[in-house]
Image: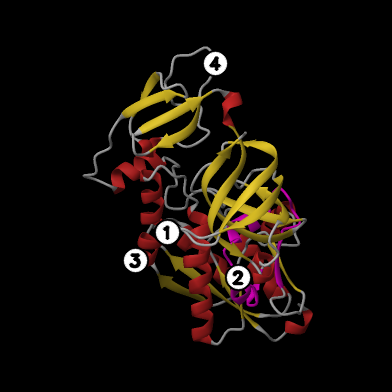
Amino acid sequence: MDNMKTKSMLIGISGGVDSAVAASILKEKGFHVEGLYIYNGFPTRAEEDAVNVAKRLSIPLHRIDISESFKKDIVDYFVSEYLAARTPNPCIVCNKKIKFKYLLEAAEERGIDYIATGHYARVENTCGENGFRLKRGIDKQKDQSYFLFELGQKELSRIIFPNGNKTKEEIKNKSRNLGFGSLSEMESQEICFIPDNNYRGFIENYTKGAIFHPGNIADRKGNVVGRHRGIHSVTIGQRRGLNIASERPYYVLEIARDKNEVIVGREEDQFFGGLIAGNVSWISPDYAAAGNLKVTTHIRYRHRGVESEIKILPSNKQSENRVSIKFDKPQKAVAPGQAAVFYRGDILVGGGWIEKGVHLG
């Protein structure tokens, strides 16, 4: 990055520790830095914090209001996925459709060379055609590359992640030294528009007038073992809150939207041998051409990953760019709607949206 000394950067300032420290790192490296606060229509104290960060770092802060896009692309998607018996990941969709999209647009408008965020991830330029690689951040506990799998060559050629080579501990220490001790530690897996994490309550308020149909909870043989208050209220792998009297815990295995039924089973019933994913995006088109790829697949953010083989499938009416993934070892709780993200070592090669888990046998 040293040859970029005179380059300009537009960094997304969210009001949290990570983006504040990332902005200060860029300043120290001698870049001309400007900040962008993206207002999503859900007021929090984050905007106040963003203004204070910009003041403390003496950088200009621009503000854009994208409430309408956010409601349509993120909140409506989030709610409709739950109502369709899938488990959404709004942070991934937001990175592609909101954060990086509007950062790039705002940088274009202002003639700024690069964009940056506080994500823990790295970009490497191998200098060949399609040569940008997305890599895990060096802090394995905090790596956020999973949330960025929909970014492609166009975005990666303009993105800098100053925190990618740092540990969270280093960022926290730097934050204290800069006097940013009071900033929020909000993690990416918290949903910014549902600060109390009560997503069921949020969905019910947001869809006022919608009728939630209670229905049966049945075991795999079809025996009714309980009732649910609406399919939006359960997720695959859920154990708590099912209110089923039983000596051994039940887990949600499947949500049958057509029958308005939740299928449950025991711990040992939760395992899948693989999955089908659709709308796969590859960081570089070169990977898709490889056919049967050996990768490590992560089926949710905190998943440890499983060695797998990818096969390219034909598209169907519902989705394009489909793949089947065969796990080397069976995995629990494969949730439709979540992201399956593929790595080779530290390099993220691509990811897609889980359509269904494939049972063993």
Residue at the image position 48 percent from the left and 73 percent from the top: 102
* Residue at which label 2 appears: 152
Q: How far apart are marks 2 and 1 (CA)?
A: 24 Å
* Residue at which label 1 appears: 317
Q: Which mark is residue 68?
A: 3
For label 3, the crowd category at 10 Å Cα-Cα, with few meaning under 14, some 14 to 19 and many 20 or more, is few
319 is higher (above) or lower (below) than 200: below
Q: How far apart are marks 4 and 3 (CA)?
A: 46 Å
Looking at the image, is mark 2 or mark 3 nearer the viewer?
2
Inspect the image, locate mark 1, and give the three-letter code of the amino acid beneath it.
Answer: Lys
Membership of 214 in magenta stretch: no
Name which of mark 2 and mark 1 comes first in the sequence: 2
Looking at the image, is mark 2 or mark 1 nearer the viewer?
1
Q: Residue 276 carries which label?
A: none
Give 84 or 302, whichever is nearer the viewer. Answer: 84
Give 34 or 90, whichever is nearer the viewer. Answer: 90
